Amino acid sequence: MKSLIKGVVAGLAFSVAFSGIANAQTIRMGTEGAYPPYNFINDSGEVDGFERELGDELCKRASLTCEWVTNEWDSIIPNLVSGNYDTIIAGMSITEERDKVIDFTQDYFPPSPSLFVALSGGSVDLAGGVIAAQTATIQAGFVSASGATLVEFATPDETIQAVRNGEADAVLADGDYLMPIVDESNGELAVVGQESIGGGIGMGIRESDAELKSRMDKAIGSMKADGTLNTMIKKWFGDDANVF
């Protein structure tokens, strides 16, 4: 009987400890703040972009208050797991490898192609050249397995700069991030290849926070159902963006 009671008490303690976040009124939303138009820091020093607008709406529908926290990309998952914030909403593709460490909501952005971008006017050996990618991304994993030489950088801006200064022959990143940069480069940069890798983009949540995941899943589903999410995607990524 004592062992049974201990088991019940332990189970209750576990439940209380890990349901606190989901029941809290304020949820800390972790993002990078350096990956426009998904997320960036605006002139007022605040988190802005598609995921800021989306996250605020999701919290509203889930009856929660958002508090925004920025974190460097290469440590964004460890800092979620250690409790520095409660979600990751940072253009993170849902992958099997990541899903072993954290949980994901349903996708809030559909799968979209990754692009190779290089300096205009030259030929690029994508299979055997030097390709830049941001550390800990699906693109870095793809390049590493492709036979090309991978050079990794902590921020997406540094991957572009590596192409411009000759450190890399091309960069591989999300097309939604790269295309505005190409369009604004006055012909300096060009798309030289395309790959379909990874799934859609979802919100990362600790495996212990099942209630929070459920609430966010429900909120995302409601935005898909009423068309709000597609409208928001087109606002930030253009009328030709992939939608649900």
Image (spheres, grey):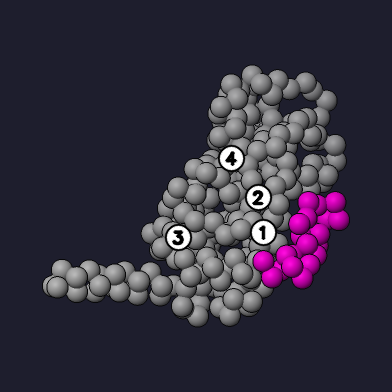
| Left or right: 7 in relation to 232 | left
Q: Nearer the viewer, residue 218 or 174?
A: 218
Give the answer, above or below, for where 16 lies relative to 204. Answer: below
Label drawn at residue 108: 1
Q: Nearer the N terminus, badge 2 or badge 4?
A: 4
Q: Position of residue 79 (x, y in %)?
A: 43, 57
Is the C-beta separation of discs 1 and 2 under 8 Å? yes
Q: Nearer the viewer, residue 124 or 229?
A: 229
Q: Nearer the N terminus, badge 3 or badge 4?
A: 4
Residue depicted at 55% across the width and 28% down the height: 144
| Left or right: 212 in relation to 111 | left
* Extent of the magenta region: 221-244
Q: Nearer the N terminus, badge 1 or badge 2?
A: 1
Label drawn at residue 169: none
Residue type pointed to by label 3: Arg
Residue depicted at 49% across the width and 43% down the height: 97
- Find numbered disc 4 in the image and state the secondary structure of the residue it sits on: helix
| Left or right: 37 in relation to 217 | right
Q: Which residue is mark 2?
A: 200
Q: Which residue is mark 4?
A: 138
Q: Position of residue 73 (x, y in %)?
A: 53, 50
- Find numbered disc 3 in the image and state the secondary structure of the residue it sits on: loop
Q: Which residue is mark 3?
A: 206
Q: Quadrant of residue 239?
A: bottom right
Determine the CA span between mark 2 and mark 3.
Answer: 19 Å
Q: Nearer the viewer, residue 242 or 73?
A: 242
Residue type pointed to by label 4: Ile
